[in-house]
Amino acid sequence: MRKSIVFLLFLSTSLWVSAQQTAVTNNLNSPYARLKNINIRDCQWTGGFWGERSRLMREVTIPHIWDIFSDPDVGYAYHNFKVAAGLEEGVFKGSWWHDGDFYKWLEAACYLYAQEPSDSLLRAMDDIIVIIGKAQEADGYISSPITITGTPRFQALQHHELYNMGHLFTTACIHHRVTGKKDLLAVAEKAANYLNSVFNPLNTELAHYAMNPSQIMGLVELYRTTGNKTYLELARIFTEQKGHNDKGTDINQSRTPLLNETEARGHAVMAMYLYSGAADVYAENGDATYMEVLKNLWEDVVFRKMYVHGGIGSHHQHITAAGDQAWEAFGRPYELPLEQGYNETCANISNAMFSWRMMTLLGDSKYADIIELELYNAALAGINIDGKHFSYTNPVLRTKDYTLQTNDLNERQMYFESYCCPPNLTRTIAKSGSWAYALGQDEVYVVLYGSNRINSRLLSGESFQIVQTSNYPWDGDIAFDVNFPEKKRVTLNLRIPSWAETAQVKVNGKPQGITFEPGSFAGITRIWNPGDKVELHLPMPVTLLEADPRVEASANKLAVSRGPLIYCLESKDLPENISILDLGISSNILLSPEHEPNFLGGLTVLRGEGLHIRRKSSDHTLYRKANTDLVPLPIQLIPYYAWNNRGRSEMTIWLPGF
């Protein structure tokens, strides 16, 4: 079925779905989740920053990725399913994990359908699912590279079989929730039953297995969708099995059992998928050992191994303390190299995934701060403003003399062989409205700010509506038209970001005598009347940031933030003869925000006076006598996510401070 998905976007909203709608991560009945996720359809971005990006996903990115995946000479993924199904002749092409990436794209298409249902999109997904079903082997096993090549199952970590099936499980649950259909869910259940026959009880020979354990999250969602406790038990086994034979290695967190782990090690994405899966298991079983480990691991990542823009995975190649070779990996605490920093887009997204789960489990706003940091910075940098070009790595420094390493790119590309990040970022943006709010008992939590409309129900069953209007993140003025059930006391919890030193709240124009702590949810509890209005003002001064002195690479350097955004200096905004390495800033620099609606898709730049570090010596030896002048030079900083949209360039987040 080689056909462009463009026609699918001429959507008819006449079709509605009879199935009960449930959340992306459906923790409604999870006994150990303090906050519950809203339903998939409940919140829609109506404009502004995320509204524009959601529209881009619908109109450009989802169709573009379909054209990539459905082209047998480029993206291969759909071709592989057809060959595995016996519908076409051919050989396996692409990466071993292409199946999983295709499922992520299909998940994004499900979110598109949830927001704008159409018969044509439903039929297209039906056709795809028929072929996926035919690619499944009789015993339930499904991973097209293995089927096509005849390779023995579960022999090599890099074959990513469980990764592929894990994303199948998640997508099948989402597809069922938004369409009411069970065809893909049946494929997923058959595959999960097969895995149960292989891995339950614990197979010590395969205890190190699972390169990238998306199957844990997927199995928990299958349990939540079907009620079959076998899937939850299998998820627990996969969570706890690693580290129970001598084949384990730090690369995939299998040297040390998770419940004995003390720090984040190895491949960053694999680690965060494991932690996210464990958080889902905890939401169902409440094992206190899980929570202590997860809290410690989150703190290790965020406080010792995360870049200022939210990026994680500091090394292309790394030898762990145990002597294991790892790649796309965490380093030691505070080991955060600048230009060589890896910061895979998928890793940055998975940091948000893990933080979302921790927020729902504990109700703490500090986790939501990381979700916001990732979405606006290290994750969003993975896509051009045109919606068609992507990056794999996201450094905090790029110079013209830098030699590209694994998966580095001078400019974002439409396609590259390891294509996991584009569909992952697409599904994340497509479902971002589901992360905008969460629910407590007679409580509504506002997690993400931006223009949106939510029509949902309190956990007690009464319906409510909130219309949020904002130009966030360009300014901090946010308005809410609130319609809660009459004569019912409800708490509206507004997230006060950790970067917001102060906050002001008015209800129906009257200031509230409430102390708002940065990095917390501020609750407004009252009996609401129809048409009540809430106004939140978050001041957004320009802030200079410094790193912990143990981060050697950032010593004596400053970074710039405003609101949730991290800013950078790009060589496109400098005179041709000045390198990005020849600029610094004063510690008392005055940077003025100026909104440019027609520049790089519309954004706020910061303008001020930097310092040109003019080096008088022409000696290019490694070390030389210091001989420089500091000369004032006008500079312009742009949000980090927007860099590299004007052709190849140098860029830095960190600038020498004087």
Image (cartoon, rainbow, N blue to C red):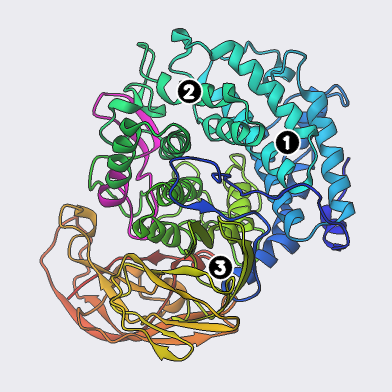
Instruction: Check residue 238 in the rendering and tell me which mark sits there, or answer none.
Output: 2
Mark 2 or 3, nearer chain start: 2
Magenta-tinted stretch: 300-329
Q: Is residue 203 above or below residue 79?
A: above
Residue position for label 3: 645
Image disc number at residue 613: none
Give the Cα distance between marks 3 and 1: 28 Å
Name the residue beneath numbered marker 1.
77
Name above or below for residue 207 compared with residue 552: above
Q: Which amino acid does label 1 sit on?
A: Ala
Task: Decide which of tag 3 and tag 1 comes sooner along the chain.
Answer: 1
Q: Is 409 placed left or right of 513 in the picture?
A: right
Above or below, 316 relative to 459: above
Say left or right for 57 vs 36. right
Q: Tell me the crowding category of disc 1: few under 14, some 14 to 19, or many 20 or more residues within 10 angstroms, Cα based.
A: many
Residue 476's place in the image compared with 11, above or below, is below
In this view of the protein, can residue 404 be seen by the observer?
A: no
Nearer to us in this view, 361 or 652:
361
Q: Quadrant of the N terminus?
A: top right
Q: Percent position (x, y) of residue 363?
A: 39, 54
Q: Which residue is drawn at 44% across and 62% down?
A: 372
Residue 315 belongs to magenta span: yes
